[in-house]
Amino acid sequence: AQKITQTQPGMFVQEKEAVTLDCTYDTSDQSYGLFWYKQPSSGEMIFLIYQGSYDEQNATEGRYSLNFQKARKSANLVISASQLGDSAMYFCAMREPRPGGGNKLTFGTGTQLKVEL
Amino acid sequence: EAGVAQSPRYKIIEKRQSVAFWCNPISGHATLYWYQQILGQGPKLLIQFQNNGVVDDSQLPKDRFSAERLKGVDSTLKIQPAKLEDSAVYLCASSLEDWSYGYTFGSGTRLTVV
């Protein structure tokens, strides 16, 4: 089974509108974390937001918020007031503990977001 | 603080040649990762170091790929001999023990094997 599933290969949104990028995950661990990264065409991976499995409140960072629904194992990214510069590939990733210590970060397949005028 | 440095930025080689990539993580970051990102896919972990020890290399094709982390700081990833399917972006990342700050990635090395 896929650890991280992003079902939207591509999304379009109009400038200034909000958009939700979907992410579901699969883990049997109680302690884990969910990340969202942005990858523009230049190729760098930019950390956007993090949600720990024990965090009771949804994480927010500026225009980014993470809609964390633990029972449904979903961690959707919401971008408010979209800007042209938000056009990029977005990856959801999950951190899981390793049996021998340390952590492992697994990525989804990504969603290509295009912001239009 | 300086970010994760990677070089070269781009590399084109012929199949069966060898190539090496270099990564300098953020100072103080004990954990270093090498990821392979094939076009249109998410990054796939190749190898993970904790200081200068290997934590996970289960997805590293060890018949052709090798990696080392010198003195727990810089790291090199080598491919010998390269195959066409090795064409990808190779991303290096590093992290603190407190991963809530995220993993910091370098700009990557785009490898094209012809």
Image (cartoon, rainbow, N blue to C red):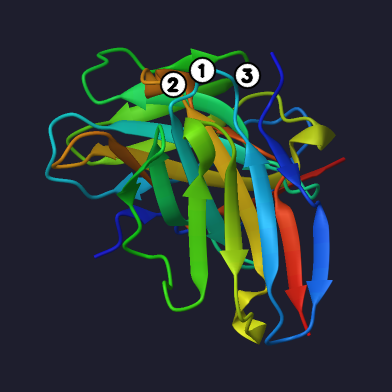
**Residue depth check, mark 2 versus mark 3: number of the one nearer the observer:** 2
Amino acid type of the residue that numbered disc 3 sits on in the rendered structure: Arg
Q: Earlier in the sequence, mark 2 or mark 1?
A: 1
The one of B25 and B41 positioned closer to us in this rendering = B25
Quarter of the image with the N terminus of chain A is bottom left
Q: Is residue B62 visible?
A: yes
In the rendered image, residue A12, in percent from the top left (x then y), is placed at: 70, 50
**Residue depth check, mark 2 versus mark 1: number of the one nearer the observer:** 1
Disc 1 and disc 3 on one polypeptide chain: no
Q: Is residue A83 left or right of residue B44?
A: right
- Mark 2, residue position: B96
Residue name at image x 63 percent, y 31 percent: A18
Q: Which mark is residue B28?
A: 1
**Identity of the residue furthest to the right in this view:** A117
Q: Tell me: residue A92, above or below residue B35.
A: above
- Mark 3, residue position: A63
The one of A46 and A6 positioned closer to us in this rendering = A46
Quarter of the image with the C terminus of chain A is top right
Q: Is residue A45 visible?
A: no
Q: Tell me: residue A37, above or below residue B96.
A: below
Q: Chain of mark 3?
A: A
Q: Tell me: residue B15, above or below residue A77.
A: below
Count of residue discs: 3
